[in-house]
Amino acid sequence: MSPVLIDFSDGTKVNNTINKESSDINKLYLNMMNVIAGLPANVFKKTFCACFYDDKIYFEELFIHKQKYYRKTHTSFRCPTTPRLLIEYIKQIVKILQWKEAIVNLTLEFEE
């Protein structure tokens, strides 16, 4: 396992609004598009994020293909706050590790 930074979008529905969450998501993806635009030519044009909104954690990827951006959700799950939700989270670990492996593979491209 490895650490991941997660954008918590200023909290949960208790102290956040749908408009605020939407604005935060738009900012996140605009920044990710800027990161992609700055990548070297020899690196596949994609980047990754983990974010929390609507009481769920999303592990996502943004990539460009034929000058269009595509957003892929590798996995998502409700924040585990009960034993049942923890079991659901455990079922997602393989997908989370695949997401992490994709990040490692992209990082290795920078070394080539």
Image (spheres, rainbow, N blue to C red):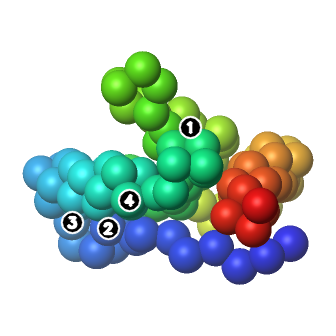
Q: Are marks 4 and 2 in contact (CB under 8 Å)?
A: no
Amino acid found under the numbered disc labelled 2: Ser
Task: Give whichever of 22, 70 is nearer the camera.
Answer: 70
Q: Amino acid at mark 4?
A: Gly
- Earlier in the chain: of badge 4 and badge 1, it is 4
Q: Earlier in the sequence, mark 2 or mark 3?
A: 2
Q: Which mark is residue 9?
A: 2
Name the secondary structure under disc 1. Answer: strand
- Of label 4 and label 2, which has the lower sequence position? 2
**Where does label 4 land, which residue?**
38
> Sequence order check: which comes first, mark 2 or mark 1?
2
Kind of residue indicated by mark 1: Thr
**In this view, 5 is above or below 100:** below
Residue marked by disc 1: 73
- Residue 15 quadrant: bottom left
- Graded by Cα atoms within 10 Å as few (under 14), some (14 to 19) or many (20 or more), the crowding at tag 2 reads some
Front-most of residues 4 and 67: 67
- Residue 81, x across and y down, in percent: 64, 66
* For discs 1 and 3, the disc positioned in front in the rendered view: 1
In front: label 4 or label 1: 4
Report the mark closest to the observer, 2 or 3: 2
